Amino acid sequence: MYKKVSALKVRQNLGQIMNEVSLRGDDYIIERAGKPLVAMIPIEKYQSMQEEVEKFFESLDQLRTNVKKGDQNGMNGLIDEAVRSYRKAKTKTRK
């Protein structure tokens, strides 16, 4: 679950908020004028999200290779794998 905080409050309490993010695993949505602007999340969560994105694109590249080769069975498996990987990454970002 995300905590919402204004940009001004972040500027005033940056050290405390960074500790909450890094030590407790809190996620923050930083707003300006009441509109969400950026997110602050633990580095581990960010790295995990990046890994999932990389896996997705690797699967996509493999899919493109198989399309060129005309391997229909391999393509279907890779499409399914890419979709599962994307959905998994999407679910993780919601937590």
Image (tube, rainbow, N blue to C red):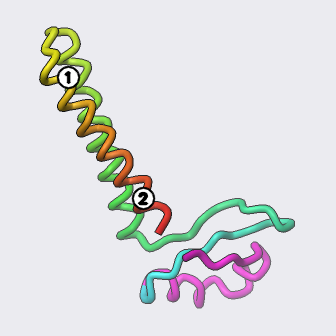
Residue visible at 59% across and 75% down? 2
Residue visible at 17% across and 17% down? 66
Identify the residue under disc 2: 91
Q: Is residue 15 above or below residue 33?
A: below
Point out residue 24 in the picture as x, y percentages from the top left corner.
Answer: 45, 88
Q: Quadrant of residue 75?
A: top left
Q: Quadrant of residue 30?
A: bottom right
Segment tinted magenta in the rendering: 1-22
Point out residue 32 in the picture as x, y percentages from the top left corner.
Answer: 80, 66
Q: Is residue 55 left or right of residue 13?
A: left
Type of residue at label 1?
A: Met
Residue visible at 26% across and 44% down? 55
Report how many numbered discs are placed on residues in the image. Answer: 2
Q: CA distance from mark 2 to mark 1?
A: 24 Å
Point out residue 82 in the picture as x, y percentages from the top left corner.
Answer: 29, 38
Q: Is residue 19 above or below residue 88?
A: below
Q: Is residue 16 above or below residue 64?
A: below
Query: Does the magenta-highlighted stretch encompass residue 91?
Result: no
Chain-order first, disc 2 or disc 1: 1
Near mark 2 (Cα within 10 A), the count class, few <14, some 14-19 or many ≥20, is: few
From the image, give the main secondary structure of the stretch colored magenta: helix
Query: Does the magenta-highlighted stretch encompass residue 16?
Result: yes
Point out which mark residue 6 bears: none
Q: Is residue 39 above or below residue 63?
A: below
Near mark 1 (Cα within 10 A), the count class, few <14, some 14-19 or many ≥20, is: some
Residue visible at 16% across and 9% down? 70
Mark 2: secondary structure: helix
Type of residue at label 2?
A: Thr
Mark 1: secondary structure: helix
Q: Is residue 3 left or right of residue 41?
A: right
Point out which mark residue 75 bears: 1
Residue that sits furthest to the right in the current view: 33
